[in-house]
Image (spheres, rainbow, N blue to C red):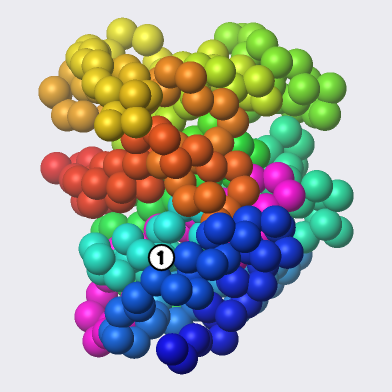
């Protein structure tokens, strides 16, 4: 069996990390004969600095405009790790969209965390939001992208950064996904960041949304000991415009026995503006993710599939309709 270079790298990485069962499966499982999509590094630079990012273009892309999802990894992660754990590239082939993975280097944060807790990285056209927005616009310029269907999502620190992107660039992103993250403005320095992660942010500190409401889907495990689950509640409420929106609650359970609560949020016109999924028994991990990546729990509902479903239900132009 002929393996692509990317397959060989993945097998070696799994073996290095002690995941021998996964490595053997990667070697022996039948593979599709369809040509793989491209997954390559690019870079962006502006007044705020520069960053590398990996862009996945699905197999068979014929240059017709496609949706774009920007994925912000968590601390200690990389684009390859995050792509493997979320399996978002596989979904991109199935549902036809582009995926970008900005890379946070150790030079910007020793743990490769997005600096969501710094004031200068919470403001439009400054710091990391400026870089991520420019990266998004660069892809729109260089690739065939449907500008009405551009989205941003992230895990943990990346989820907090995604919340900031939705608050600061509502004219760029049609919807936001936050997994195990925090609300925009939850902290203003490192000390406040650890406090918010432990017990949530004081209500008075949270940024009040004055611009358009950006539809937001939030996933959070109720056993998360890294980012307190109350942060998921705060992020969902903030993104939907604050208290007072109409909600609809349902419950379910996966085939693996993980129960969850799904709260839908609707604005005064009855439009869905948010979803909050609380996952019982899950910790600080991407729900339904692959063991090939870090910080995943395969037992939970498939967060990637639900994010994509939610995203593709929302278009930027629909807000003014």
The image quarter containing residue 97 is bottom left
269 inside magenta stretch: no
Question: Left or right of 140: which side holds 4?
Answer: right
Answer whether residue 32 is visible to the viewer in this image. yes
Q: Which residue is mark 1?
A: 89
Q: How many marks?
A: 1
75 inside magenta stretch: yes
The image quarter containing residue 193 is top right
Question: Left or right of 148: which side holds 191?
Answer: right
**Residue 285, position as x, y percentages in the image:** 55, 36
From the viewer's side, name the closer residue of 32 and 207: 32
Residue 117 drawn above or below residue 46: above
Residue displayed at 49% across by 86% down? 3
Residue 136 drawn above or below residue 266: below
**Residue 201, position as x, y percentages in the image:** 64, 15
**Residue 92, position as x, y percentages in the image:** 33, 65
Quadrant housing the C terminus: top left
Residue 317 drawn above or below residue 248: below
The image quarter containing residue 20 is bottom right
Question: Left or right of 5: which side holds 153?
Answer: left
Q: What segment carries the magenta color? A: 58-83
Answer whether residue 79 is visible to the viewer in this image. no
Residue 207 drawn above or below residue 121: above
From the viewer's side, name the closer residue of 52 and 140: 52
Callout 1: helix, strand or loop? helix
**Residue 170, position as x, y percentages in the image:** 41, 44
């Amino acid at each position: 069996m002929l393996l692509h270079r990317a397959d060989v790298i993945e097998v070696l990485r799994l073996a290095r990390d002690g995941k021998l069962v996964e490595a053997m499966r990667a070697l022996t499982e039948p593979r599709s004969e369809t040509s793989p999509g491209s997954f390559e590094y690019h870079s962006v630079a502006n007044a705020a600095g520069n960053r590398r990012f990996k862009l996945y273009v699905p197999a068979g892309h014929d240059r017709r405009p496609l949706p774009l999802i920007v994925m912000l990894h968590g601390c200690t992660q990389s684009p390859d790790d995050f792509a493997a754990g979320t399996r978002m590239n596989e979904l991109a082939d199935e549902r036809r969209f582009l995926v970008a993975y900005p890379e946070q280097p150790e030079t910007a944060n020793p743990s490769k965390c997005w600096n969501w807790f710094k004031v200068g990285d919470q403001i439009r056209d400054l710091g990391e939001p400026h870089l991520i927005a420019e990266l998004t616009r660069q892809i729109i310029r260089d690739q065939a992208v449907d500008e009405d269907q551009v989205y941003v999502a992230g895990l943990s620190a990346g989820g907090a950064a995604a919340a900031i992107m939705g608050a600061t660039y509502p004219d760029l992103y049609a919807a936001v996904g936050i997994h195990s993250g925090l609300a925009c403005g939850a902290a203003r320095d490192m000390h406040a960041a650890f406090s918010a992660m432990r017990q949530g942010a004081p209500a008075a500190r949270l940024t009040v949304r004055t611009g358009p409401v950006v539809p937001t889907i939030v996933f959070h495990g109720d056993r998360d000991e890294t980012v307190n689950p109350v942060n998921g509640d705060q992020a969902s409420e903030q993104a939907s415009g604050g208290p007072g929106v109409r909600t609809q609650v349902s419950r379910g359970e996966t085939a693996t026995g993980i129960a969850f609560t799904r709260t839908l949020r609707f604005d005064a016109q009855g439009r869905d503006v948010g979803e909050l999924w609380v996952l019982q028994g899950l910790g600080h991990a991407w729900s339904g993710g692959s063991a090939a990546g870090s910080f995943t729990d395969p037992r939970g509902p498939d967060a990637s599939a639900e994010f994509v479903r939610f995203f593709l239900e929302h278009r930027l132009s629909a807000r003014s309709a």
